[in-house]
Amino acid sequence: MTRPPSTGWRWMRSRAAVWSALAVSLLTAGALSAGATATTAASSTPLPPIDTSQHFRVMPLGDSITVGVGSSTGDGYRTPLAQYMVPVEQLYTAQWVGSQTSGSQSDPYNEGHSGWTIADLTTGIDAWMAASQPDLVLLEAGVNDARAGVDAPTMAARMQALLGRILADSPTARVIVGDIVPPWYGTQQDVASVAVQQYDALLPQVVAAAGPRVTLARMSAAVTSSQLGDGLHPNDAGYWAMAWTWWRCMAPLLSADSVTRSGENPLPVPVPQTTLCPT
């Protein structure tokens, strides 16, 4: 069941196929670029910080990675992300929201659905948004599309549709979209891994076309293939890297100084803010 918004706690995927997909990707990129141009003027004016004076409802949205599969606690990135938020907890009252529960936290709510594709998530998003009324959506999805043989342009179009629904459902909600760490099944030329890499290349244009309320988090710049315990899901170290990336990309949306009190960087090799959060 979905917890009512009023309750909460403080916290803190053969060469010919590849070239064919690339050709279609270029066509899709052109279409997305045209859409992004239309939002340039609006994006040039920074939005004010999220109003957290009454509440700060965060919806983790996605597939089994959002559930937390592969982590020792079942919480995935949610527990370390909550810890990163501790230094600025005085700015807001925060809570996870969603119709699902997983992990060991006292606040276990999320909208993670194991095995679901981007299109699957789109079928439920209107009801979830209405029930949970999130202020911020952390969206990480697409690897199941790639594993099912969906090509990168179709994945991008699906994400564009999902973002459109989220923004239509809420006039104020902000969205951070995480790109995908390519699944590691012994070779980065695995079909799903290739599709993911192509999708990740298109995602910045999808995000730009969605407008200023949507930003990008480069999970692929933070989580390494060695941190995918089963070749797909992060291990604890990988989830910490995800949490750090979410935090670095969400902190500027909260207040002007949140990013300066950011906690300990868990990445073995530091990655610049502009690489992790390019939009």
Image (spheres, rainbow, N blue to C red):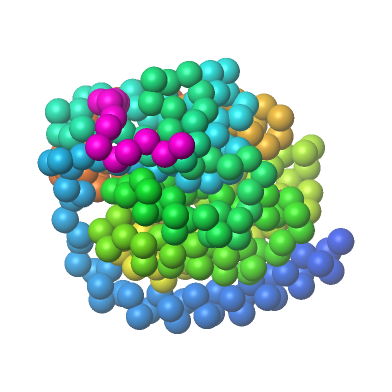
Which residue is more in the foreground, 127 or 84? 127
Which residue is more in the foreground, 189 or 3? 3
Number of numbered tags placed on the structure image: 0
Q: Position of residue 232 (x, y in %)?
A: 68, 37
Q: Is residue 123 above or below residue 176?
A: below
Residue at 41% over, 71% down = 209
Residue at 78% over, 49% down = 190
Whether the magenta-drawn stretch holds residue 216 is answered as: no
Q: Is residue 239 left or right of residue 170?
A: right
Q: Position of residue 239 (x, y in %)?
A: 51, 29
Q: Residue 44 is drawn in which quadrant?
A: bottom left
Whether the magenta-drawn stretch holds residue 5 is answered as: yes
Outermost residue to the right: 14
Q: Position of residue 163 (x, y in %)?
A: 44, 62
Q: Is residue 235 above or below residue 249?
A: above
Q: Residue 43 is drawn in which quadrant?
A: bottom left
Q: Position of residue 213 (x, y in %)?
A: 31, 60
Q: Is residue 151 left or right of residue 42?
A: right
Q: Is residue 259 above or below residue 11?
A: below
Residue segment shown in magenta: 1-13
Which residue is more in the foreground, 7 or 69? 7
Residue 189: tell me if it is visible: no
Q: Is residue 252 left or right of residue 218?
A: left
Q: Residue 97 is drawn in which quadrant?
A: top left
